[in-house]
Amino acid sequence: MKKALFFFVFSAASLFSTEKGEFVVCVHGFMGSSWNMRFLERNLKKEGWDVINWAYPSRDSSIREHGKELVGQLICLAKEKPGRPIHFAAHSMGNLVLLAALNDPMCPEEAKRGSAVLIAPPFKGSAWARWLHRFSLVRWIAKGFSGNELMTKEDFRDLGDYPASLRILVIAGNLGFNPVLSGENDGTISLEETDLSTPHERVVVKRGHKTIVCSKKVCSLISQFFAEATAV
């Protein structure tokens, strides 16, 4: 009787296990750190995902160079779980770093077959950042690499396109007031600047640029989007 009960409990635990067996890579934005993505990381780990909260010195290299660094991480993950899709949750400039990585010739195929949630992505640059570029102190703080790119470029089409094989959800915020920006915005980038030509789903939430990654609603949207990927 005890053996039968143990077998039933063990079987039930296995049946309802939340282990996903797949990686989610979190990529923070400019002048950020892994702490910025910690809220999302904890939430995804609770749901059974293997989360890699990838940190990089955002001011010290170009966006493409950061992308190459990310590719090195993705190669290691693909070797650890060959054939399993790799998923992403990126914020702000992290979306551009991810874009550069996915277009790098060394990027593993596993990274191109997962799902990606792109949070507050500045695909058309940021009019606010370009306005700030006029101040020497801001230019000094941002340095002359990725920060200069963010403060001078009006789009990032040179980085390539997201693979058509990648499921994409763009989450943009509209809780911001910035007289430099036209239309709805999150205080740093406008909704128009988050436009993406690659087919994708889109949700707008009442959040600012910095706090959007700490939103329970955003966590819920990400969880649902990733859950749909494993349900197929």
Image (cartoon, grey):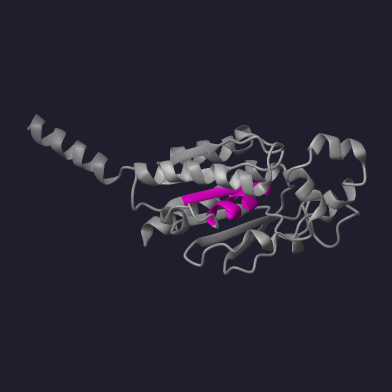
Quadrant assignment, res 4: top left
Q: Position of residue 145 (x, y in %)?
A: 74, 43
**The one of 35 and 157 positioned closer to us in this rendering:** 157
Judged left or right of residue 63, residue 49 is: left
Seen at 59% across and 47% down, the residue is 67
Quarter of the image with the N terminus is: top left
Judge by depth and name the residue closer to the eye, 141 or 186. Answer: 141
The question of residue 166 being in magenta is answered with no
Residue 96 in the magenta stretch? The answer is yes
Could you tell me how many numbered marks the image carries? 0
| Range of residues picked out in magenta | 87-102
| Residue at screen point 75% across, 55% down | 174
Determine the main secondary structure of the stretch shown in magenta.
helix
Q: State left or right for residue 144 relative to residue 90.
A: right
Compared to residue 77, the image places residue 108 above or below, namely below
- The outermost residue toward the left is 1
**Residue 70 location (% of width, % of height):** 54, 44
Q: Is residue 176 found left or right of 88 in the rendered image?
A: right
Is residue 18 something that shows in the picture? no
